[in-house]
């Protein structure tokens, strides 16, 4: 009887969840609930990617968002208030444009222009996959034509092209001027006519010595209109909004110009103005590499490159005709140079494509490159073009290991033994058919890295194990490493990579898998069995608000997604040496409950609980003496301990 009631309850609960999700997506009020974003951060260019054609959280609630583009990754350099593509052409005699990113200062209302959104379908989300997870030597991933299945999910026959592929699809006709609660800017008369474009977008990147400063975009433009698109033009719009994030970014000292030598769009922060000069003279560059048809190697030829740079204001486009006119100008605008600065925008594009018939697809490939100065930026863009022309044939490193971390007392053990539950195949079985020396199975060893600052590094090599095969160090392989001499309660991050045998005949290698492909962080601390001899204690005690606990080694660190800087909510007092399962109640000196925490080693992996100095109403607490009461749960319910600590503000 009880089991029957239990099953009925579970079934009813699941049914309610499904009905709730269906109701959420059936209402179709703006914004679509499946608007999402992820970072492409496999290499030095950390770029935000959204499934609505715009590199900014925009319609997704994000706490403490910092960067749309961070280059070099881990620096304070920030770029992009916004960017996106413009698609324009003639449809049924009308001049039309569909815009994924722009800024309109002329309209009422004005503001950001975004016409592309996912469908009101939970499957229209962002899909992430790596070439390390799925490979087939008989398939050229650059020529794959199956991206999404009929159910909107990633197609089972999709093969990733890079170390990190992010894919999504969105439309210019799912959110329109008639959608409830749609942005007012979509109701401007000049934007209400639609091209009926569906876009499959892909951002992809590699982390190796040649391509670590480049990310690529593919836009697969699908004509879902009943009429053909003719005289079609495409371009990338970018508002650099660049500077040193820690200094406060000025929007009036941006540069955006045509580099005559490299022949691409350059953007960045003008040095010695605005008080927000970036580290290392960092710059970014954009180029439209070419147009092609899916599954075809050869690009469409005889297209003209266009470029235009302007200051925010009267020159901002407003209507479909404005966007078409600006995008189709057959010229390179050289009005501004590296010494010109202001609230700048830039547009680089190509065209015209004579016709895209109903149901046809046009592929456009974009390169976004970074460089520490114009010379390095030109080299990065040169590498991007070479890779594009070569069909994205990149020398392959071995697959990275999959690993776990286990905290111990003043130590952490990293274990990368291959398990049957892992998908793919182990690094030792990796193959590279592109080598010149004929060594197809070219795995050679492992490297273990540690960071004390965060999951993006900087990284220190703490261990290396090399196969005994006549190549390299021949020290012998191991699949486990214990890092000792660590401080309990500090968080440490680890990465394990694999590397191959150098191909001397090609002068390439050894190639190493990306350090940031898998990063795991944990804190060393005593295990429960230490409870019999050691008491629970708070660290730091006293806690001093005038101390900077975020410096190396970082006791305090950003605790929210998409945030790199320290906030007040990142304050941290840690309770050490806890039972495996317990509650921690914090009281004022006169017995008022401030906050209650729960701890479960099974889910956390360590016996440390952290408190951010907020009370149960999420208000910051003041100076004073506080008591804590730790009570064991489950099999440790007889454990109870009282302690105290001091906060000084």
Image (cartoon, rainbow, N blue to C red):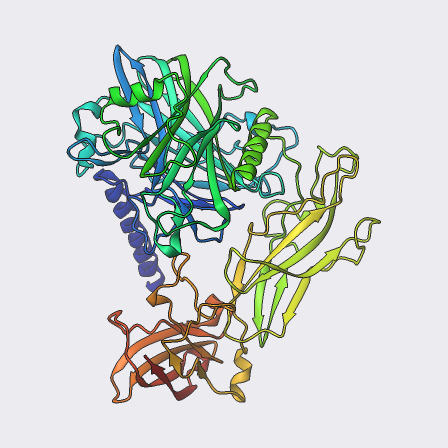
Q: Residue at x 47, y 74 (%)?
A: 608
> Horizontally, is 127 left or right of 101 in the view?
right
**151 up-or-down from 521: above or below:** above
* Residue farthest left in this picture: 108
List x then y, in percent, for residue 231.
36, 13
> Horizontally, is 328 left or right of 281 in the view?
left
* Quadrant assignment for the N terminus: bottom left
Q: Residue at x 28, y 79 (%)?
A: 622
> Horizontally, is 475 left or right of 279 in the view?
right
Can residue 546 be seen at all in this image of the molecule? Answer: yes
Quadrant assignment, res 640: bottom left
Q: Residue at x 51, y 71 (%)?
A: 490
Can residue 53 be seen at all in this image of the molecule? Answer: no
**590 up-or-down from 622: above or below:** below
* Residue farthest right in this picture: 470
List x then y, in percent, for residue 77.
44, 49
List x then y, in percent, for residue 35.
32, 42
Quadrant assignment, res 493: bottom right
* Quadrant assignment for the C terminus: bottom left
**344 up-or-down from 144: above or below:** below
Q: Residue at x 55, y 25 (%)?
A: 143
Give the mark count: 0
Along the line of sight, which residue is nearer the eye, 446 or 75? Answer: 75
Along the line of sight, which residue is nearer the eye, 570 or 122? Answer: 570
List x then y, in percent, for residue 621.
28, 76
């Amino acid at each position: 009887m009880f089991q029957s009631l239990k099953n009925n309850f579970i079934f009813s609960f699941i049914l309610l969840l499904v009905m709730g999700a269906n109701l959420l997506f059936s209402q179709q009020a703006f914004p679509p609930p499946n608007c999402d974003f992820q970072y492409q951060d496999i290499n030095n260019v950390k770029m935000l990617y959204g499934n609505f054609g715009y590199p900014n959280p925009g319609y997704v609630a994000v706490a403490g968002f910092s960067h749309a583009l961070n280059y070099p990754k881990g620096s304070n350099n920030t770029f992009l208030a916004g960017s996106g593509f413009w698609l324009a052409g003639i449809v049924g005699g009308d001049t039309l444009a569909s815009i994924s990113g722009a800024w309109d200062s002329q309209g009422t209302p004005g503001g950001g222009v975004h016409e592309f959104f996912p469908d009101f379908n939970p499957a229209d989300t962002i899909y992430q996959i790596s070439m390390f997870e799925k490979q087939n030597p008989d398939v050229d991933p650059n020529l794959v034509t199956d991206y999404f299945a009929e159910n909107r999910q990633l197609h089972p026959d999709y093969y990733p092209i890079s170390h990190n592929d992010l894919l999504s699809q969105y439309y210019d006709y799912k959110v329109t001027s008639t959608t409830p609660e749609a942005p007012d800017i979509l109701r401007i008369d000049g934007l209400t006519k639609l091209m009926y474009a569906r876009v499959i977008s892909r951002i992809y990147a590699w982390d190796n010595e040649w391509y670590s400063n480049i990310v690529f975009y593919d836009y697969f433009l699908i004509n879902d209109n009943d009429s053909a698109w003719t005289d079609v033009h495409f371009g990338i719009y970018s508002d650099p909004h660049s500077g040193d994030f820690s200094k406060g970014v000025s929007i009036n000292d941006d540069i955006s110009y045509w580099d005559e030598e490299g022949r691409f769009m350059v953007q960045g922060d003008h040095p010695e103005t605005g008080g927000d000069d970036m580290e290392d003279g960092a710059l970014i560059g954009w180029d439209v590499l070419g147009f092609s048809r899916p599954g075809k190697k050869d690009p469409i030829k005889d297209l003209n490159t266009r470029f235009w740079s302007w200051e925010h204001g009267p020159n901002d486009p407003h209507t479909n005709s404005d966007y078409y006119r600006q995008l189709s100008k057959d010229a390179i605008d050289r009005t501004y140079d590296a010494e010109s600065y202001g609230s700048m925008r830039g547009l680089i594009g190509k065209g015209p494509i004579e016709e895209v018939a109903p149901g046809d697809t046009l592929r456009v490939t974009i390169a976004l490159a970074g460089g520490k100065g114009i010379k390095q930026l030109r080299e990065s863009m040169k590498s991007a073009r070479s890779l594009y022309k070569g069909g994205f044939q990149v020398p392959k490193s071995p697959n990275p290991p999959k690993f776990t971390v286990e905290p111990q007392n003043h130590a952490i053990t990293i274990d990368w033994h291959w398990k049957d539950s892992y998908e793919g195949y182990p690094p030792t079985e990796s193959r590279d058919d592109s080598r010149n020396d004929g060594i197809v199975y070219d795995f050679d060893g492992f490297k273990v890295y540690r960071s004390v600052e965060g999951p993006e590094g900087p990284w220190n090599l703490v261990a290396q194990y090399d196969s005994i095969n006549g190549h390299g160090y021949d020290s012998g392989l191991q699949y486990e490493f214990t890092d000792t001499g660590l401080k309990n309660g500090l968080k440490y991050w680890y990465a394990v990579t694999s590397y191959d045998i150098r191909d001397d005949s090609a002068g390439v290698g050894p190639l190493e898998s990306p350090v940031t492909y898998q990063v795991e962080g944990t804190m060393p601390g005593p295990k429960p069995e230490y409870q019999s001899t050691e008491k629970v204690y708070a660290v730091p005690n006293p806690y001093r608000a005038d101390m900077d606990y975020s410096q190396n080694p970082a006791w305090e660190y950003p605790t929210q997604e998409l945030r790199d800087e320290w906030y007040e909510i990142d304050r941290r007092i840690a309770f050490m040496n806890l039972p495996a399962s317990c509650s921690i109640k914090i009281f004022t000196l006169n017995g008022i409950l401030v906050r209650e925490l729960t701890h479960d080693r099974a889910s956390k992996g360590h016996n440390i609980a952290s408190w951010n100095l907020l009370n149960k109403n999420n208000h910051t607490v003041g100076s004073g003496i506080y008591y804590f009461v730790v009570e064991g749960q489950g099999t440790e319910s007889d454990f109870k301990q009282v302690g105290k600590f001091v906060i000084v503000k």
